[in-house]
Amino acid sequence: MNSKTNLVKTDQSDPYSPQLYDLEAVLLMRDNGVNVVGIGYTIYLGSEYEAQMMMEAGDLIAQAHAEGLIVVLWIYPRGKAVKDEKAADLIAGAAGVALCLGADFVKVNPPSPTDNATSAELLKQASAASGRCGLVCAGGSTVDAQTFLSQLYDQIHIGGACGNATGRNIHQRSLDEAARLTKAISAITFDDATVEEALAIFNG
Amino acid sequence: MNSKTNLVKTDQSDPYSPQLYDLEAVLLMRDNGVNVVGIGYTIYLGSEYEAQMMMEAGDLIAQAHAEGLIVVLWIYPRGKAVKDEKAADLIAGAAGVALCLGADFVKVNPPSPTDNATSAELLKQASAASGRCGLVCAGGSTVDAQTFLSQLYDQIHIGGACGNATGRNIHQRSLDEAARLTKAISAITFDDATVEEALAIFNG
Amino acid sequence: MNSKTNLVKTDQSDPYSPQLYDLEAVLLMRDNGVNVVGIGYTIYLGSEYEAQMMMEAGDLIAQAHAEGLIVVLWIYPRGKAVKDEKAADLIAGAAGVALCLGADFVKVNPPSPTDNATSAELLKQASAASGRCGLVCAGGSTVDAQTFLSQLYDQIHIGGACGNATGRNIHQRSLDEAARLTKAISAITFDDATVEEALAIFNG
Amino acid sequence: MNSKTNLVKTDQSDPYSPQLYDLEAVLLMRDNGVNVVGIGYTIYLGSEYEAQMMMEAGDLIAQAHAEGLIVVLWIYPRGKAVKDEKAADLIAGAAGVALCLGADFVKVNPPSPTDNATSAELLKQASAASGRCGLVCAGGSTVDAQTFLSQLYDQIHIGGACGNATGRNIHQRSLDEAARLTKAISAITFDDATVEEALAIFNG
Amino acid sequence: MNSKTNLVKTDQSDPYSPQLYDLEAVLLMRDNGVNVVGIGYTIYLGSEYEAQMMMEAGDLIAQAHAEGLIVVLWIYPRGKAVKDEKAADLIAGAAGVALCLGADFVKVNPPSPTDNATSAELLKQASAASGRCGLVCAGGSTVDAQTFLSQLYDQIHIGGACGNATGRNIHQRSLDEAARLTKAISAITFDDATVEEALAIFNG
């Protein structure tokens, strides 16, 4: 429901991603046969415009639920006030905000690992904070399939994620490779496959 | 009805906690069986965004009362213009604003004690200012049960509070301990118990 | 209809007093038996937020008159651009703005006296500028009854005021004294009493 | 439909004149017998608030025309970005904006004369730019009748104005003199009188 | 649907072009017989006011399509954050934004040529990004007919444009010359003419 370019950087102005359509426009598409089952909205917590985005998200969630639509929030701590966007406690705070706002799913960045804990271990705090709001991690920049599938496995089995939200790792691959990776992701997420089993699916 | 993160500090930008839902969304929940009896809203008096929050609160109070809902205001003096957030006269001013806005209850911080007066004695000014709007104090950070119950007793019997609004002193205890503390609080608030009697209830 | 605290000073931010309720909330009270005959709104001319307050006032006046309610404006020149808030020409300008906005009454501060003219003499310009919009002066800080009643007499008989708007000079007195002062004020305002006659009433 | 004081100067904040009433309030007056035939709005082009005023004007013009009302725009280039408010090309740009916005009449300041051209000659560019939107000049500060009538004659016959919009040159004269000047203005504007003929009317 | 003057420069304030009318005003014209088939809106990507313009554009597109109107977006990267307004990747980004917003056509500036590629070659990236949203280039400042027609031919046949959006190259020519240039443009755009054939049409 909202979007922005990355032309204006945070040192010039804190990020604000404006709502571009009202829900009525979405419902009109659904009324005309587009199979819309949910909407998404991005919040930059810690931005000086956090308030505007929380208002828009809150309002959209109430409206969407009344119309039978689910809501996914992308929540990224970002702004002059945010020193480390991937600190585990900020990621957990973002997950908690999603729960408080009533979102159905929240997409967060995987926490940066520390000397004492892996990213997946640190993600536990976030999935606890998100409660009944399902947590998924951003796929990030493109990596080899084994790395990707291992991370996903750990996010789900250690970190408590309920899936993932992958972009570049799919659309920056060939169609054939992307299709096989999608099947491997599905195997881990829905069929309880191990990394090795998923990798075998990927390798066809 | 409103909320914010604490990522942006006052020295970067004065606090503004945006309204996240309109009353219609609340009424929809009530219509669907959730037993909603009131709403709450936080105002930071002395913030450069005070005006926005007073507007939202004023409007919500008028709407909520028309729908048979009570309204609790959390009012905290905060912002670059506020040197001492817990000065007794500012707390009293906050209580008076709640009355003027037509709130049913106001939650304030207990005033800082001075050389001449305890916090509970200083609270008298605030409970006088809040008039028929019931005044309760924030519970603050977790302390031992005796300290907590003594403060509560004094807030009610000396300071004129009509109850309390406690978070961390409950949810940072074990379930069992929290349940016993809740009973002790209830005894002081509703059954006119002494601190000793309440402590006996807590100690089970 | 609007209000603010005095925590944020003009050197930090120019004053803005936000509208806290819409007229509908007022009409609802009237419909439920409260004898509401008018509304009031405060404008700080010369504030960087003057535009916002003039908009809200203009809109409220049109709405209120359509519903048979009178409107009183408090207009005070205030803000970084205003060097002398009680200069006679600014007070007169404030009175003229009230007329242009269509207010029924305007409350202004009495002008500061100059070497050549008393406050009441300087007020003539303001009452001329306010035209058919009735002008009243703020009562200011508490003074002895004789001083107060003399000022009031001069404001009406020399300055062209049609009454007064007194707060502290009433509510900072004992109930008995306040009642007698109210009668004295009434005698000057409605019964054409002299200062001596009014003082006799006050002295009971 | 909009107005402002002149207390806040351009070096403190660029000018913004807020809309004080919506068209509904005007239509209500017309419905109640006031012979309203049009509305007016002032735009300060080059102000940092230009966008806000162009929005309000554009919206009002569409609404007013739908209700059979004509619209007059006062357009003055003003703000930190404007070095010479009476430069002929800026005046012409202002006239062109009025046409684009769909105004029926535009009031501009007469351009400052240059070494090569009189004000009236320079006004040609503006009246060409205003197209079917009638252009009138502000009357400016009070001058003697001959000067005023000569300027008016030249604005119409050389500059392409279709009339004038005079304030101070009328209301700063005695009633009798103002009435005679009005007749003289009418003679030039509607009856194609020469300056001498108009002056004879003024001299009665 | 939106417009602005160029008086306030980017170093004073980032560009914002406000929406001047709502769609209802456009529909009213259509209802009254004006053959309106579409609307246009200008977005300055990279401006600090990008959010406001993307919101207005997004909302207008949803509304316009629901009413059977097509939408053309003019998208120009501009603001303090934009170092090179005609960099090919920014132009392509602009085209992609138009597609995402659901516009039917997008008008962009032709990219600046580099050492390795002509403007038309660089335009390929933009027309790929605009997808099913038709891309046209701004005509720019007036050049001789052969230059203009060659550029147009290359924009269509190399760069993937589906037409052009020419202003000054038409209206800054005589009526006769403008008519002949229009026919030449039409021949290239709709009849697959070569530059030589189009030039022959222009030369009559």
Image (tube, coloured by chain):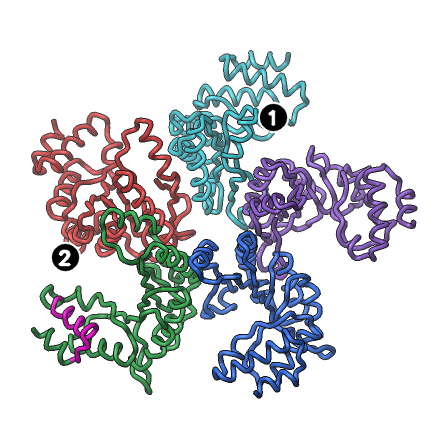
Chain colours: A purple, B cyan, C red, D green, E blue
**Which residue shows up at 9% across the image and 35% down it?**
C191
> Which chain letter goes with mark 2?
C
Left or right: residue D148 versus residue C76 is: left
Where in the figure is residue C164, as x and y percent of width and height? 20, 40
The amino acid marked with disc number 1 is Asn
- Please tell me in which quadrant of the rendered image residue D42 appears: bottom left
**Which residue shows up at 55% across the image and 18% down it?**
B185
The amino acid marked with disc number 2 is Asn
**Which residue shows up at 58% across the image and 88% down it?**
E203
- Is residue B50 something one can see in this rendering? yes
Residue in the foreground of this view, choosing between E28 and C172: E28
Residue in the foreground of this view, choosing between B117 and B105: B105
Left or right: residue D56 versus residue A202 is: left
- Is residue B112 something one can see in this rendering? no
Q: Main secondary structure of the magenta part?
A: helix
Residue in the foreground of this view, choosing between E129 and C71: E129
Left or right: residue C191 versus residue E161 is: left
Q: How many dots with numbers? A: 2
> Which residue is label 2 attached to?
C116
For the record, the magenta segment spans D179-195
- Please tell me in which quadrant of the rendered image residue C150 appears: top left
Mark carried by residue B169? 1
How far is the residue under mark 1 from the one under mark 2?
Answer: 67 Å
Q: Secondary structure at mark 2?
A: loop
